[in-house]
Amino acid sequence: MDFGKGVSLAAFNTKIKEGGDLLDLYNEKLSDLDDLLNQLQKAEADTNDLGARLLGGVKISYGPDSSEYEKAGGTRKSEQAKPGPKAKTKTNPPA
């Protein structure tokens, strides 16, 4: 079937195949990016874990209220916010 000016069943099938090929390529790249994102998230988690372990080592070596602990990114014990009094909850008597 051909209606002229590029309007034909063959042209339509070609466009469908081109679209399918592009979709396949897109999905392949998306899969690669998903894998890269997983690697990045793992690297971030490993870095956070190592940072926490290093801060713990500084805390053990120098103490939780030391300047070294603060320099390493911790909050000195003496500078931590103290918990305030708990607010009393008002209970309504049953009616």
Image (tube, rainbow, N blue to C red):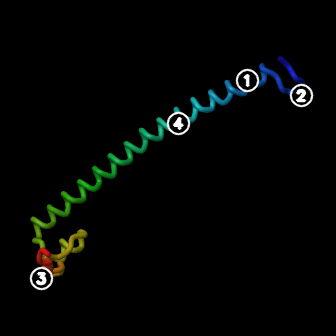
- Looking at the image, the residue that sits furthest to the front is 95
Q: Are discs 3 and 4 less than 8 Å apart at CB?
A: no
Quadrant position of residue 70: bottom left
Q: Rounded to the nearest whole Å, what is the CA distance between mark 4 and mark 2?
A: 35 Å
Determine which residue is flagged by label 3: 85
Q: Is residue 94 left or right of residue 5?
A: left
Nearer to us of marks 3 and 1 is 3
Crowding near the residue tagged with mark 3, few <14, some 14–19, many ≥20 C-alpha atoms within 10 Å = few
- Which dot marks residue 36? none
The amino acid pointed to by label 3 is Pro
Quadrant of the frame with the N terminus: top right
Q: Earlier in the sequence, mark 3 or mark 4?
A: 4
Determine which residue is flagged by label 4: 29
Q: Secondary structure at mark 3?
A: loop
Q: Earlier in the sequence, mark 4 or mark 2?
A: 2
- Residue 2 visible from this viewpoint: yes
The location of residue 51, given as percent across then percent down, is: 24, 59
- Which dot marks residue 5? 2
Determine which residue is flagged by label 1: 14
Relative to 85, residue 19 above or below: above
Q: Earlier in the sequence, mark 3 or mark 2?
A: 2
Q: Secondary structure at mark 4?
A: helix
Q: Nearer the viewer, residue 3 or 94?
A: 94
